[in-house]
Every structure is written in C-alpha cells, then in structure tokens.
Image (spheres, coloured by chain):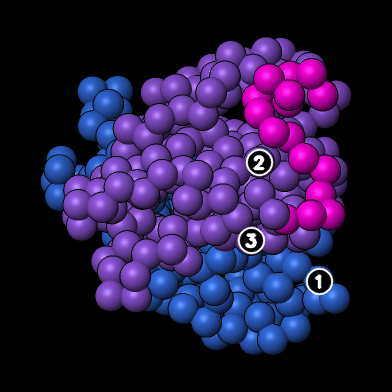
Chain colours: A purple, B blue
Amino acid sequence: MKKSIAIDMDDTVADTLDRHLTWYKSEFGISLERSDLIGKKIYDVVPEHHLSTVRSFPTHPDFFRDLKVIDNAIEVIYELSQRYEIYFVSAAMEYPPSFNAKYEWLKRHFSFISDMNYVFCGFKGVFNCDYLIDDSSRHLDAFSGQGYLFTSESNAHVSGYERINSWLEAKELLG
Amino acid sequence: MKKSIAIDMDDTVADTLDRHLTWYKSEFGISLERSDLIGKKIYDVVPEHHLSTVRSFPTHPDFFRDLKVIDNAIEVIYELSQRYEIYFVSAAMEYPPSFNAKYEWLKRHFSFISDMNYVFCGFKGVFNCDYLIDDSSRHLDAFSGQGYLFTSESNAHVSGYERINSWLEAKELLG
C-alpha cells in the first residue's frame, strides 16, 4: 500500500500572503513587502485601525480565488503522486465562504489528484496519513504521523519542527 | 482522552431521501413512497427517461438545504458529545455545490459541535476515529475503526455489518 501525504493549502501550495499584500495595498495604498512579514502575520504589522478590515479579507468569497501557486508545487506534487497517496487537507472551516474558491483552485491546478482526496476540515489531528506538510505548527502538533513545517514568512522563527523549505526540497526528501 | 465518533450526514442525520421524493413528485407528478425504496436507490426505480433529471437533483445548491433531521439525532448526538469527540464527516466532494448548504445545516442543527469538527471529504478511509456511523457500506469498508451501518431504506438488504437502526439505538449502544 502506498504511503500517504496530507498537504495543506494556504501558504503551502497557495500563496495567500501575496493576496493579503495585494488587497492591503489596494485598500489602504500602503505597500508591505514579504520581508516585512518575516516571523509575523499581517495582523501583527498593520496599524490597529486597519485590523478589522484586514481580518475580514479572508472571509470574502474571492479571497482564495486565483491565488498564485507556490513555486514548483505542481510538478513536485505530480511526481510525488506517482509514489504516494496525496490528500489536500485545508482548514477551510475557518473561512466557510472559501469552500467554492478552494475547490475550484484545486481542480484547476491539481486535477491529477482526485477530488475524493480533497478534505475541508478544521482540526487536522483526525487524519492518519503518514506525512503532513503544513506551514502551521499547531496542525503539526495535533498530527500523529511525521509532520514537516513548510517554511513561510510567518513561521520563520518557529523552532522544534522538521522543515521543508521549498517544494524542490520536498522532492529531495520524499521523492 | 475521549474516544471519537465520526458521523456521516446524508441519510444518517439528514433526510436526503425525503428531499429526493419531494423533488421527484414536484418534477414529474409521481408519488413514490419510502417503502418503494427498500433495498434500492431512487435511481433504481425511476424510469430511464427520468434518470438524468433525478441524478441532477443533488447537484443543485439547494438540494441539501433545510433537510429534515433524522429522528432523535439531535438529542442523542448532544448526549454522546458529552462523552465522545464528535466529528461530522460528509463525502461532500461528490457534490461540490452542496458545501454551503451542508455547512449551514450543521451550524443550524448541531451548533453544539464546533465547526472545527466538520469535515467535507471524499474518501473516508483517511480518518482515525474510533467509530464511524454511516449508511454507506463502502465508507465502512475503507474505515479502520469500528464501523456501524446506519439503517436506511437503500441499505436494507446489505449484510455483514454491525448495524444501528435508529438514533435511540445509537444511544443504547454507545451512550
């Protein structure tokens, strides 16, 4: 039986930080750089009076639509799918208006993975895959298999986890 | 740590057969009774030239909206939630237009279960709960824990599974 890999979506395969920065500039005329977000979430760096607007961005049905794909994710995951059972596991329950955009995004970019292997959930501790690749350490904490922290700006200073810094590194490690 | 129960939605807690019969009557003026569906799916009993319409019913965004709750499901699951970690696990990926209606239905009738414990998926073999209550034997086949076939019209003749015939029976067995 193939080993299985659960793969997170946001900031693991889909670039939501880019969307946050674009919408923030469009709303407030202020350019933030990715380098401003090292070790931080956008909620940590915007002024207090912008916070409720910025927090509302991901609740918009279009926020998760047409997101850029993280570099090399498609080709590496295609290759991994030849050896592993791949699941996309997104904590979409945190933003229910995101369901349709997330589903369509996966179908568009990862149609080689059956949608029977897409999972929208909240708590990820309930999956018994062999591996989980996720940029959120709290999901790795709950996971019973081998977790890998996918490096993103916000988790740059998080320690204590095995890391995957890029999809090319994932290919070397698991391919 | 609490033991965990994964609970299916369609025809386990939400009465989709009732919706099928209502929409079928509304579309074709023909009354089918639940007793006509013993051991069958609706697709097995309607005439060939109605089939494509009937198969399209669950792809409508409103099909899963305002479904009746299966008898005693709410009070029994509330009671079980005091002793067990409860997850609602629906193969919603089979009908992506159902996401919003299913989410809203769960929030409306089962708001005492955190939406972090709602799961929309395809293949249910990936969950490591202790129990799965489901009216589809194929999901029980894939499940690694103890499965219970929740009795519905369509599975009346299926054998080889532990059964739960009603939510009152679930309370006796697991309560």
| Residue A161 shown in magenta | yes
Q: Earlier in the sequence, mark 3 or mark 2?
A: 3
* Residue to which mark 2 is pinned: A151
Magenta segment boundaries in residue numbering: A158-173
User: What numbered label is drawn on residue B3?
Assistant: 1
| Residue B19 shown in magenta | no
Asked if labels 2 and 1 touch by Cβ distance under 8 angstroms, the answer is no
Q: Amino acid at mark 1?
A: Lys
Residue in the foreground of this view, choosing between B63 and B32: B63
- Residue A115 in percent (x, y) is at 51, 31
Judged left or right of residue B100, residue B28 is: left
Q: Nearer the viewer, mark 3 or mark 2?
A: 2
| In this view, A7 is above or below B10 | above
Q: Nearer the viewer, mark 1 or mark 2?
A: 2
Q: Nearer the viewer, mark 1 or mark 3?
A: 3
Q: Residues within 10 Å of mark 3 (few under 14, many from 20)?
A: many
Q: Locate residue B106: give its quadrant.
A: bottom left
Judged left or right of residue A170, residue B41 is: left
Asked if labels 2 and 3 touch by Cβ distance under 8 angstroms, the answer is no
